[in-house]
Structure formats: C-alpha cells, structure tokens
Image: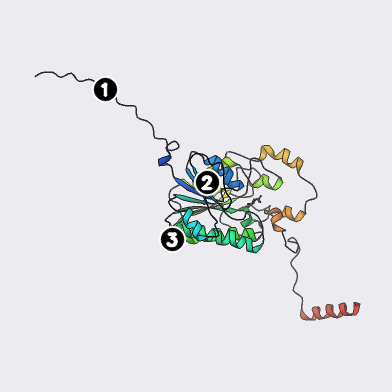
C-alpha cells in the first residue's frame, strides 16, 4: 500500500471569548435619565460591559462607542414604548431627583415610572432596575438599622414617588413575571459630601457593581437592595445585596475626618434625627420631633375658647 505523506497543519489558536470586547454579543441596556448625575457616572463605569442605549428628555452629546441616544420623555408612554424596544434590560433613572411640587413629581416620577414598567412589559423586556431612593425610607431614625424588609416611611413627595415605584415593581413582578430590582440609592458621588452622606455614600464603581448584579444575576423576581458602599457608618443592613453577590469596594470612612471638619455647625437638629436629613423638613409646617398633640375633651376646648374671648 502506498504511503501518503500528510502535512501537519497547526490548528488556529482558539481565542477566548470575551463578551466585553464583542459588542455583537453584549447585552443592550437602556438607561433612562442618562443625562443626570447618576446616569453620567453609570455610563462611564459600564462602558465596554454592555451596549448602552441612553435616553433623556434633555439632549445628550459626546456619545462614546457602544452608546446610542434616543431622546424621550418618560411622562410619555409613546416615547417609552419607542425607547424600550429591543433591549435586554431597563435601568430606570429618569424622573425628578429631589423634592418638588406635586405636579412635577406626579408627571415625572409617578406617571414616568408607570410608563417605564408598562412599556417594558409591552415590549417583552423582562428585567427592570428601578432607581429608588433612601428617601423612600427617610423617616426612619438614624439610631435604627433598617433592612430591605421594612415598610416605606417616605420623607417627602419625592420619597412617596419612590415608594410608589417599588410597589409598582412588586406588582409587575408578581402579576406579569417581570424581574425587578429596586435600588434604594443613597448618594452617588466620587466623594461623600457631608456627615449624613458618610452613612449613605455610594461610590460610582460600587454603583456599577450593584447595577450589574441587578442586570445579570439570573433567577431574580423582586429584590430591594440599598445603594450604598460598605460604609462603616451605614444605618442600613444590606444583607440582601450581599446575598445577591454584592461586595462593595469602597467605604466613606477614610474621608470622614475631612468631611466632619468642613461640616457646618448650627444645622437644624431635627434634620439630624432622621435618615432623610433636610428632606424631612421640606415644607413640613411643623416639627417632626414635637410630642403628639393630646386630644382635648369638648369641655376643655370650650373653656379655652371662653378664656381666649375674654382676653380680646
Ligand atoms: C436622592 O434621592 C437624590 O436623588 C439625590 O439628589 C440626593 O439628594 C440624595 O437622595 C441624598 O439623599 O443625598
């Protein structure tokens, strides 16, 4: 039998698959409210990990590669239906981010959150990360440690709108099988700004870690995590986030000396009592520390009115 010489050809080197580099295989994520502070940090931190569709009512310039922009108002269901098409998950940051007049909160945060969830549902987007806030629970006291199971105690109309968004998320998870993660965000900043923020500070890279868990962790239905770094001064028990894999990389403590030195004295002591800080006082028309008013008997009330008339 004749022998045949076979030339050995070296097989091509197998390339390891790197999802970060392969944009065709990256998940496309929608970030609403992308022009805001939190959105800007998130864009930078998530670059290269996902394809980003950015949306905001304001125009957005300087798009990086892997980013696209679609202008949209979350108060318009039509806009939200347009921007949620064809994405793997929605990170809903859109809305009004501090206390404001009821009409503004209603439109941007209540109607806006409804439209985000409803548009995602209609477009078959299963996963939503809802940017809730520490102000959904701002009327808990600072000497309490609260976890993700406490009932809401909003400190403002803004806080009420965040509690509403969480409730909506729970409904869409239970009724429609959507996968919803609510992040009760403290304060996202490169550095903690003041004494209260030493407890609720969230560094941009820890924010990105939480959002990535919320997007990628399989098998979630409805979860609440606190959006804070591993601050030693925290007043949240963030065990649920840890259970889901969160390992914060930052702690506000190394900044504490500098922050406390700059802290202005003479702040209203009532804002020191509650976790929500100044939000608890906004237009309160009263003193949250005051003793509860004792109900008066009709006789005592009549006596008081008589005495007041006499004085006139
Ligand atoms: C929030 O929820 C706001 O969006 C942000 O602007 C800060 O005010 C933050 O809370 C805070 O409590 O510092």
Q: In which quarter of the image is the C terminus?
A: bottom right
Task: Out of 203 and 123, give the one closest to the viewer.
Answer: 123
Tell me how far mark 1 sits from mark 2, CA to CA: 46 Å
Task: Find residue 54 and report its horizontal and vertical position in percent.
Answer: 52, 48
Q: In this view, does 4 lie to the left or right of 59?
A: left
Q: Is residue 265 left or right of residue 207?
A: right
* Image quadrant in which you'd find residue 177: bottom left
Above or below, comparing residue 101 to residue 252 in the picture = below
Could you classify mark 1 by the number of other residues whose Cα lies within 10 Å: few (under 14), some (14-19), or many (20 or more)?
few
Q: Which of marks 3 and 1 is nearer the N terminus?
A: 1
Which residue reaches farthest right?
A: 311
Task: Find residue 84 and report its horizontal and vertical position in percent.
Answer: 47, 53
* Image quadrant in which you'd find residue 193: top right
In the image, the residue with mark 2 has its CB under 8 Å from the nearest atom of ligand 1? no
Tell me how far mark 2 sits from mark 3, CA to CA: 22 Å
Circle nearer the viewer, 1 or 2: 1
Q: Which residue is drawn at 72% across and 41% down?
A: 259
Above or below, comparing residue 178 to residue 193 in the picture = below
- Secondary structure beneath label 2: helix
Q: Residue at x 60, y 48 (%)?
A: 36
Task: Find residue 196 and report its horizontal and vertical position in percent.
Answer: 69, 48
Q: Name the residue under label 1.
A: 9
Task: Out of 221 and 172, give the one closest to the viewer.
Answer: 172
Q: Mark 3 points at which residue?
A: 176
Q: In this view, does 175 lie to the left or right of 206?
A: left
Residue 306 visible: yes
The reply to whether the C-beta atoms of the residues labelled 3 and 1 are less than 8 Å apart is no
Q: Quadrant of the N terminus?
A: top left
Q: Which residue is drawn at 90% across and 80% down?
A: 310
Above or below, comparing residue 254 to residue 129 in the picture = above
């Amino acid at each position: 039998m004749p022998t045949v010489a076979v030339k050995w050809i070296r097989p091509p080197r197998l390339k390891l698959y790197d999802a970060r580099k392969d944009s065709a295989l990256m998940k496309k994520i929608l970030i609403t409210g992308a022009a805001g502070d939190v959105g800007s940090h998130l864009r930078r931190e998530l670059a290269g990990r996902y394809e980003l569709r950015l949306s905001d009512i304001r125009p957005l310039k300087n798009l990086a590669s892997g980013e696209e922009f679609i202008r949209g108002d979350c108060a318009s269901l039509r806009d939200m239906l347009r921007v949620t098409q064809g994405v793997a998950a929605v990170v809903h940051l859109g809305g009004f981010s501090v206390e404001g007049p009821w009409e503004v909160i209603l439109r941007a945060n209540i109607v806006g959150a409804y439209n985000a969830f409803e548009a995602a549902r209609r477009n078959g987007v299963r996963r939503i990360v809802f940017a809730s806030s520490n102000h959904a629970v701002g009327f808990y006291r600072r000497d309490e440690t609260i976890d993700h199971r406490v009932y809401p105690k909003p400190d403002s109309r803004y806080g009420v709108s965040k509690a509403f968004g969480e409730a909506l998320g729970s409904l869409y998870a239970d009724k429609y099988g959507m996968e919803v993660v609510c992040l009760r965000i403290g304060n996202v900043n490169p550095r903690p700004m003041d004494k209260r923020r030493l407890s609720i500070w969230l560094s941009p890279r820890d924010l990105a870690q939480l959002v990535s868990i919320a997007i990628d962790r399989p098998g979630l239905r409805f979860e609440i995590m606190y959006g804070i770094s591993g601050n030693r001064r925290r007043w949240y028990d963030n065990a649920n986030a840890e259970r889901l894999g969160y390992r914060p990389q930052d702690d506000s403590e190394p900044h504490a000396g500098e922050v406390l030195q700059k802290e202005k004295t003479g702040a209203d002591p009532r804002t020191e009592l509650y976790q929500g800080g100044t939000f608890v006082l906004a237009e309160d028309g009263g003193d949250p520390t005051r003793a509860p008013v004792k109900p008066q008997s009709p006789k005592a009330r009549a006596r008081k009115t008589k005495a007041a008339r006499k004085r006139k």
